Image (tube, helix red, strand yellow):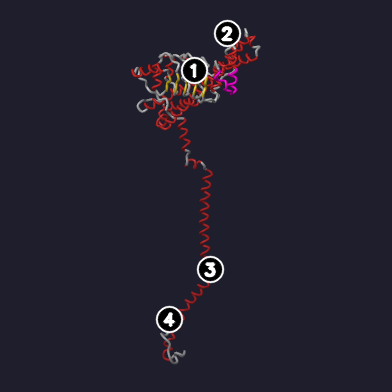
Amino acid sequence: METRTAATPAGPTEGPAGKGIAPADGAAAQMPDAATESQSAAPVQREAAAGLRSSPQGKSSQTRKAIKAACGSLLVLALASGVWFYARHQHPELTVIQSPPVPEQVAVVLEKPSSDSDRAVPVADDHFAWEAKLRQIDTLRQALFAKKDEILLLQQNYQYGILELEEEATRLIRRGGFDSLTQGLKNRRLELALQSIQRRYSYRDSLEKPLHWIDLGSEELLYLQRRAFFDLQLKDIAEHIDMAAHMADMDSALMKYQPTAEKLSINNSAPLQPSQEAIWRRLAEQAKHVETSAEDQRNQDIVAEVCSGNLGRVPELSSLTLKGARCLAESGTMQLFLNRLSGMTPATARKLCEWPGQWLCLNGVTRLTPELAGQLFAWPGEWMSLNGVSEVPDEAAKHLVKWPGRQLELMGLRKSTGIEFLVQWEVSGGRLFVPADIRQQIEKFRRAGQPRAQARNSGRS
């Protein structure tokens, strides 16, 4: 193309030349150039034509080469994948070696240490583990104490049930005039009473077994706790302290003294004790002193009404049995007026003082013994009237100091015995009602300041 351009005239010519007729002088000179142009252009044209003819074949050749390269790559990748797959499934232990079970190895080392020194170090240095373990000991001991209180209360209930049935049995013996156990067993009510008394004795005594087990467990737990605590303080300065052994001992005790039903069970297969013959002899002796008057029968009728929920005749009671005291304690009344009662046994007073009321009137009581005072001044109520008492001995007045009540009426006092304890109770927050002459002696005693009474925190307002 460049040769053709160089041989072409620079521009059009006018005249004959412009019309396509070559001039005579310049035509010959220009012919060789034209031939040369034709000869040089021919190879170019042939190459172009050849290139046009061969272009599809060139593309096919390049495509085949690309396909061969891709097939080769896929073959190499397939071989590599096969080798990896073969190695993985024929040698699974390689995976285990790459990721060993470290937690399981640690657990095995803790369970089976190679030496005492290796075992003690991680256990003794774990402050939180020891704190938690000692706290578990405290928790279990508290649970044992709570269970002991439940058993003691059950034992006390059995004892009250025994005394209540014995009161009934002595009256039956007295009224029936029975001279022997054989005669007494012919009375169905007396027979059932004797059988119930015997069973309750046996149940009450069998509760000693779980009580002993609880005492033993609580003492052992306390010993292990204190021993471990002291050794924890000394482990840094003393040698050969096996703290792991302490931990094992406490774990064993925690499992051993869990208060389960199985461990607290009692043995009911043993023969009932005491025998009915022994019970009969004791009750027959007591029956000789039982009153069987019409007034006693009326009291029993009133007690029966009280136990059925009728409290209308309570102020008429002149004597009180354990059964009557129990029914009064379980009643919902807030005031009890028992001013015809001349006295009570300590057991009856104890049961009566379980009553959660507010005002207890016992103005018929004329003698306040230390035993009776100890039960009455354990009552949790607020107001007590003992206006029939003429003297409060020192031994009885000592119990008053601990009474949390607010008001005490002793308007029948004639002697100033026990005045020191009366002053102490009044100074501690109680309100005391006494005759005018006793009040003067109390004020005189307080001015003398002998001794100075100390106020107690009784919760009074």
Pointer 3 or 1: first along the chain:
3
Amino acid at the residue labelled 3: Gln
Dot 1: element: loop
**Residue under label 2:** 288
What is the distance, in whole Å, between disc 3 and disc 1 at their CAs?
A: 137 Å
Residue mark closest to the camera, 3 vs 2: 2
**Residue under label 1:** 363
What is the distance, in whole Å, between disc 2 and disc 4 at their CAs?
A: 165 Å
| Quadrant location of the N terminus in the rendered image | bottom left
Pointer 2 or 1: first along the chain:
2
**Residue under label 4:** 5
Dot 3: element: helix
Residues rendered magenta in the picture: 301-316
Can see residue 278?
no
Residue farthest toward the front in the current orientation of the protein = 436
What is the distance, in whole Å, between disc 3 and disc 4 at their CAs?
A: 33 Å
Pointer 2 or 4: first along the chain:
4
- Within-10-Å neighbours for mark 4: few <14, some 14–19, many 20+: few
Q: Nearer the viewer, residue 145 or 40?
A: 145
Q: Vertical placement of 259 versus 167: above or below?
A: below
Amino acid at the residue labelled 2: Lys
Q: Total number of numbered labels?
A: 4
Q: Nearer the viewer, residue 289 or 243?
A: 289
- Residue 32 x %, y %: 43, 84
Q: Vertical placement of 137 versus 287: above or below?
A: below
Amino acid at the residue labelled 4: Thr
User: Relative to residue 339, is residue 454 drawn left or right?
Assistant: left
What is the distance, in whole Å, between disc 1 and disc 4 at their CAs?
A: 154 Å
- Residue 381 x %, y %: 48, 23
